[in-house]
Image: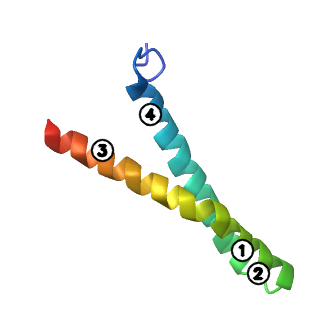
Amino acid sequence: MHPLIFDTGLTGAASVLGLAATLFLIGLLVQREAIGSLAHARARRAQVALWVAIVPLVGVFALVVVTRIAGALAG
């Protein structure tokens, strides 16, 4: 049995949500780069609109990294 799925505490859920947020952030960054290669004005507007989702996810990613490092240092 996988411990992330059958964990009774919130630790497993937090790990899964952190992983999901990280993968979503990577997907949005790839989309932004793909759209950035287009020269249309519509593409530029879409690229700016992606920042609305990217900026908070960068904050979530930083929080996940800090939490993991603090957990590793605490023992």
Amino acid under disc 3: Arg
Amino acid under disc 4: Ala
Who's the residue at 48% across and 20% down the image? 5
Instruction: Find disc 2 in the rendering and name its residue.
Output: 44
Amino acid under disc 2: Arg
List x then y, in percent, for residue 31.
68, 65
Give the vertical position of 50 relative to 1 (above or below): below
Identify the mark at residue 4; answer none if there is no mark: none
Instruction: Find disc 3 in the rendering and name its residue.
Output: 68
**Horizontal relation, residue 41 to residue 66: left or right:** right
Instruction: Find disc 4 in the rendering and name its residue.
Output: 14
List x then y, in percent, for residue 75.
14, 35
Who's the residue at 55% across and 42% down the image? 20
Who's the residue at 73% across and 69% down the image? 49
Marks 2/4: CA distance? Answer: 34 Å
Quadrant assignment, res 33: bottom right
- The quadrant of the rendering that contains the N terminus is top left
Q: Nearer the viewer, mark 2 or mark 4?
A: 4
Marks 2/3: CA distance? Answer: 35 Å
Quadrant assignment, res 7: top left
Q: Are marks 4 and 3 in contact (CB under 8 Å)?
A: no
Instruction: Find disc 1 in the rendering and name its residue.
Output: 47
Mark 4: few, some, or many residues within 10 Å (few <14, many ≥20)? Answer: few
Give the vertical position of 7 relative to 22 (above or below): above
Q: Are marks 2 and 1 in contact (CB under 8 Å)?
A: yes
Q: Secondary structure at mark 2?
A: helix
Marks 1/3: CA distance? Answer: 31 Å
Q: Are marks 2 and 4 in contact (CB under 8 Å)?
A: no
Amino acid under disc 1: Gln
